[in-house]
Image: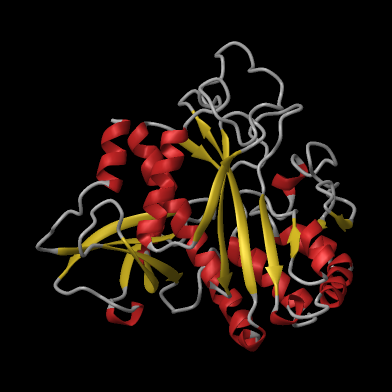
Amino acid sequence: MGTNVLVRICGPKLLRAAMTEQKSWIAVSRCFSLSKTRTLSSVPKHPADLPTWTYDGSSTYQADGANSDIFLYPVAIYNDPFRRGNNKLVLCDTYYSDKTPTKSNKRYRANQAMETIKDQEPWFGIEQEYTLLDFDGRPLGWPKNGFPGPQGPYYCGVGADKVIGREIVEAHYRACLYAGVKLAGTNAEVMPSQWEFQVGPCTGIDAGDDLWIARFILQRIAEEYGVIVTLDPKPVDGSWNGAGAHTNFSTKAMRGENGIAEIEKAIDKLSKQHLRHIQAYDPRGGKDNERRLTGKCETSNIHDFSAGVANRNVSIRIPRGVAEDKKGYLEDRRPSSNCDPYSVCDALVRTCVLNE
């Protein structure tokens, strides 16, 4: 099945007489998305060309059966790497019957912040880590009654004894590029069966849009291989690295001459809002990150704010190249792998730029 998936995603372009759209939206858990498909009579170029739709909110614990419809509002369109041709993937916002945003719709508030500061050109790059699992809940390829060798040779590894699941990763990479996702790269991570892909740099709300669609595509590809993808920030207890979503952030001023001064101002503001950010950086208000942010395995301690140059055991890292160039961006290493990127980007903008 694996080879067929790669051929289908990377092979000759399929021709289709009809045009379908597969609508994807954010699930109540905010870790992965839900989707359904409909047929249209024309090819949309903009979200405004698409009709709104509904789904059964009583089946997703968002509404009761007596008033169950939740509205889907299209917000972004991507090429469909699975059906190809004229087919599209459509990212949607969700709204209750009274047209107010659902609790899982973090995009609405984030977009308000992005529109307010769009003249400052906020850029984001998000490093999405994830772990591949077998159906028994164990990391893919791990011994059933034991553990692989200690961490060390797996990060950016090459070879059958170093990495597991590369075919899924390659298919995902190519599918995202076909879809139009701004995927910057990918690599094997420190723990075996753990991988990372990077989205960005993206301007404003596009970072969250691209990451959510990239997550959806990853789930769809892994589904065809019979593999589970988890965004649990600490899928294996003990001395194994957790999974994060390190978020790189900058404004036009930070990227300009002597922008390091603006970066340092932003870090000072972040130091005063540490708890607020911890609460925004995982879907359980910090409870998931408690297992990951222990001060070990390349993490900071969840209870303390810290910053440093080229230091991966801090809350905020300034890359060595940024410190030398005296301009660029900061890396917030606190977001968990199962974060809602809209909440993360929203918090960064409101603290660092809007001074809220």
**In which quadrant of the rendered view does residue 131 lie?**
top right
Name the foreground residue: 285 vs 323.
323
Left/right placement of residue 36 relative to residue 329 reads left
Percent of width and height locating residue 135: 45, 26
Which residue is more in the foreground, 23 or 130?
Answer: 130
Residue 224 drawn above or below residue 82 = above
Q: Is residue 327 above or below residue 156?
A: below
The image shows residue 101 at horizontal and vertical percentages of 51, 74
Q: Quadrant of the C terminus?
A: bottom right
Q: Is residue 183 visible?
A: yes
Residue 69: image x %, image y %?
A: 35, 67
Determine the image quadrant of residue 291. top right
Q: Residue shown at 86%/73% (left/top)? A: 269
Residue 221 placement (x, y as % from top left) = 37, 42
Q: Is residue 313 left or right of residue 226?
A: right
Relative depth, front residue between 298 and 309: 309
Q: Is 143 located above or below residue 87 in the figure?
A: above
What residue lies at 85% left-to-right and 68% top-to-bottom? 267
Q: Is residue 306 left or right of residue 71?
A: right
Q: Quadrant of residue 199?
A: bottom right
Is 288 or 354 nearer to us in this picture? 354
Q: How is the image coloured?
A: secondary structure
Mark yes or no: residue 29 visible.
Answer: no
Residue appearing at x 51%, y 30% in the figure: 133
